[in-house]
Image: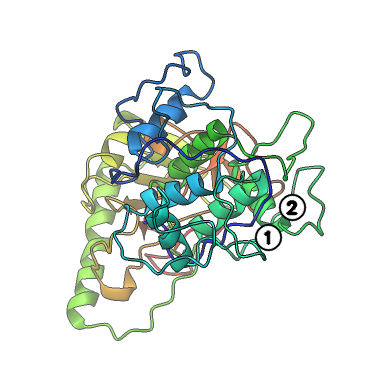
Amino acid sequence: MVATTLLVLAATAGSALAHEGHHPTTPPSPSPTPIPEVDFTDVTSTHPFGEEIHWMAGSGYLLGYPDGTFRATLPISRQALAVLLWRMEGSPGGPFPAPPATDVPPDHPFFDAIAWAYSEGMVQGYADGTFRPGASVSRQAMVVVLHRLAAMEGRTYASRFLDIPAGHRFHGELAWGSATGLARGYDDRTFRPTVAVSRQAVAAWIHRFADMTGGVWPVPAHDHHAHHCHDPITPQQQAAADQLVEDVTEYLEENLATVNDAIAAGYVMIAPPFGGAGAHWLNVEYFTDGIVLDPARPESLMYASDGTVEGAMFLMESVGDPGPMIGGCLTVWHSHDNLCYTAPPAEGGSVIGFTDMGAGCWPPSMLRVTPEMLHVWVIDHPGGPFAGLET
C-alpha cells in the first residue's frame, strides 16, 4: 500500500497538458507481473516501453485518451500523477477536505484524487494559491516521489550523474534512484533533473518500482543483520525454536549436506560468497510454492567455501505478512533492501553486489527487496541459530 503521509510532490513549472480522458477506476492489487494488455493505437508491439505501458494501463494506474491513444512521449501532468498515486492507493473514497487551490474547483474532473492527495500531504501547491493541474512534472520530482513511496531512508549513496553534484537539492533521492537502478539517466551520464518526465518514462519507473519492492510499499523497515530478542521467552517458544533447529539440522545433514546434493535437488546459486558469508542457493520451485516453513523444503541454502551446508533460509509467502512466530522473538524474520539482482529471484536472477557498496547497482542489475526470511544455521554462529548474515 502507498505511504499515505509521506509524499510531497515538488512544485514544478512546465507546459500545460490536458487531463486524461478517463475517470479514475479502482485498480487491482499492485503486482510486478504483467497483466492483460490494454490496446493503444500508438503503442505497437515494437514500442520500447510497450510492456510497461500495457502493465500500467492494465493495472488501472495510468490510462489513455478517449481516441484510443496513450501519447507516450507527452509529459505527465501534475493532476495525472496525483490520480496515478490515488489509484495506486486503491482509489480511496471521500469526502476529502477541499484543496487550498483556486484552480481545483469541486467540479474538476479529478477533484477527488487531488483533494485526497492534498489531505494526505502528498502534493502541495504554488505560492500564489494554485495547483496548476496541467503543468508537467520534472524527472527529479518523479524520483523524489518514488523515494518517498519506498520509505527507504537512512542510506547514503554517491550520485553517478554528472549533473547532480553533492550540493544538489535532491542529491540524496537522485543518488538513491541511481544506486538502485530505477533512474538510469542518459548515455552521457547526465540525469537532466528539470526536464519534464514523459508518460512512457513514468510507466517504466513505476513498473521497475513495483518489480523492486515486490508490489508492496512502503518497504517494511529492515534490520539486516542484527538479531535482538528482549521480550520474555516462554518455555513453549524456546521448545519450538529448539525443535525447529533440530528438524532443519537433521534434514540438511541427511539430504543436503553438500553443494552436489543441492544441485541434484534443483537448487541454483543466486549469490557467490560476499565478505566471508557463504554462497546462497535457491530452489525456485520452493520459492513459488507458497509453503512458508517446512524443514524439508527450505527455499534457500547457505554453503561454505568447501561446499558443506551451513544453514537454510525460509521465506514468507509475501513481503510484510506477520509470518509464523515460532519461538517468539527468538526467530526474527527479516528482509534485505540492499541487494543488486540481475533479475527477480523467481526468474533466475542472481545477486552481483550491494547498493551501499561502491556505486550501487549497475544496469542491467537492479535493487530488489527480498521477501521476509528466517535464517536457521546448523553450524555455530556468533549471533545464534537465527541470526542474519554478516556481510
Q: Which image quarter: residue 385?
A: bottom left
Q: Are marks 1 and 2 in contact (CB under 8 Å)?
A: yes
Pointer 2 local density, CA inside 10 Å: few below 14, some 14–19, many at least 20: many
State the image coordinates of residue 261 (x, y, percent, origin top left). Answer: 33, 35
State the image coordinates of residue 263 (x, y, percent, origin top left). Answer: 36, 31
Pointer 1 local density, CA inside 10 Å: few below 14, some 14–19, many at least 20: some
Label 1 amino acid? Thr
The residue indicated by pointer 1 is 156
The residue indicated by pointer 2 is 158
**Between 305 and 275, which is closer to the camera in this rendering?**
275
Is residue 52 positioned above or below 357 on the image? above
State the image coordinates of residue 225 (x, y, percent, origin top left). Answer: 50, 64
Q: Which image quarter: residue 192?
A: top right
Q: Residue 259 carries which label?
A: none
**Between 347 and 125, which is closer to the camera in this rendering?**
125
Q: How many labels does the image show?
A: 2
